[in-house]
Amino acid sequence: MRKLAVRAAAALFGALAALAAGAASAQPPTCRYKVVDAPKSLFPEIGYQTIQVACKNTDGAHQALAHVLTLDVGGGAIQLAASAPGSSGFVMQLPSDVLVATGASVAVNANLFSNCCVYAAPGLPTQLAGWEISGGQTYALQGADPAKQGFPFDASLAQLANGAVAIVYSGPGQPVPVGTVMAVTGSHMLVFGGKSVAPPGDPKSEFFGPNARTVAGLSADARTLWLVAFDRSPSPNTGLELAEAAQALLHLGANTALNLDGGGSTSMVQATTGGGGFALLNTPADYQPPCTVYASGPTSGCERYVGTTLTATVQASGR
């Protein structure tokens, strides 16, 4: 049943791959990868490692430290969730607060959102770009562009009621698959059918130039999900362009991948043992107060309030 659902989603949206391919870089970047921290288990079905990524592109040379969560979503133990709005709609929250409140195992930031980038703004109303589905309820409609940036917002990470996970094209008139209980939307599809479909870089653009990024990738058999946070430091030429992030996801083994919100929003959080605690895995790219810094976390970065958070919970572990 899982394979049928994934194949149906791929068949439904596969024809749109050619449209995105036209936006791909004519000359893909050349990247090198060095394992910094070897893979380790954070929770059952969730592993973590760090990889140094160094790329040469037509725009120059860029590098980033990749924080890689590897989730075994094929075994049925991983439940993905998107932070739902309250009675007054979506409000800005810290991913760590969402993780603690929901008892999740790990969390990353998800959709782009309006009111960015107000740092110390808990509870500030906001709007999301693209689809956001939580608990089977659709809260944000495809086509919304509160950031006024003109991005396609046509790629979504979805989980179906049977537990199957898919990354699909979800542009206007092409909703996410029937039976979707969770979905978050990215700005661009980065990898489709095992090939990069990422847009080219632009060193004059904060978004299309090298930057911190949060990316999700899925294997061809839809059993392995990668959630990756690429860090950016104050040093020049750090962070990755979209095409470079796509190459890194291909290196991991992704068949499909999408770009979520990035820059100062990029956050990766894990629950700590004992319940109720958390730790930042990456170093967020916000460096100037006011923002939230924790004594137990990175000393040079600040976790940003964001519009929505993607969590993963290991059912078998009780978290």
Image: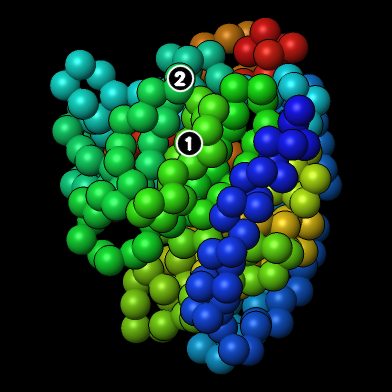
Q: Where 127 sits versus 230, above or below?
A: above
Q: From the viewer's perspective, is 307 left or right of 19? A: left
Percent coordinates x, y for residue 304 in the rendering: 34, 42
User: Who is closer to the viewer here, 185 or 124?
Assistant: 185
Q: Which residue is mark 2?
A: 135
The label on residue 183 is 1
Label 1: few (<14), some (14–19) or many (≥20) C-alpha neighbours in 10 Å: many
Q: Where 159 sits versus 195, above or below?
A: above
Q: From the viewer's perspective, is 245 left or right of 264? A: right
Percent coordinates x, y for residue 160 in the rendering: 59, 29
Q: Amino acid at mark 1?
A: Ala
Q: Picture quarter containing residue 225?
A: top right
Element carrying mark 2: loop
Q: Where 290 sits versus 121, above or below?
A: below
Q: Is any atom of residue 149 visible in this view? A: yes
Q: Total label count?
A: 2
Q: Amino acid at mark 2?
A: Gly
User: Which residue corresponds to the image point at 65% horizontal and 78% vertical from the top-left?
Assistant: 55
- Mark 1 or mark 2: whose residue is earlier in sequence: 2
User: Which residue corresponds to the image point at 38% horizontal and 42% vertical from the top-left?
Assistant: 131
The label on residue 53 is none
Label 2: few (<14), some (14–19) or many (≥20) C-alpha neighbours in 10 Å: some
User: Which residue corresponds to the image point at 68% horizontal and 13% vertical from the top-left?
Assistant: 315
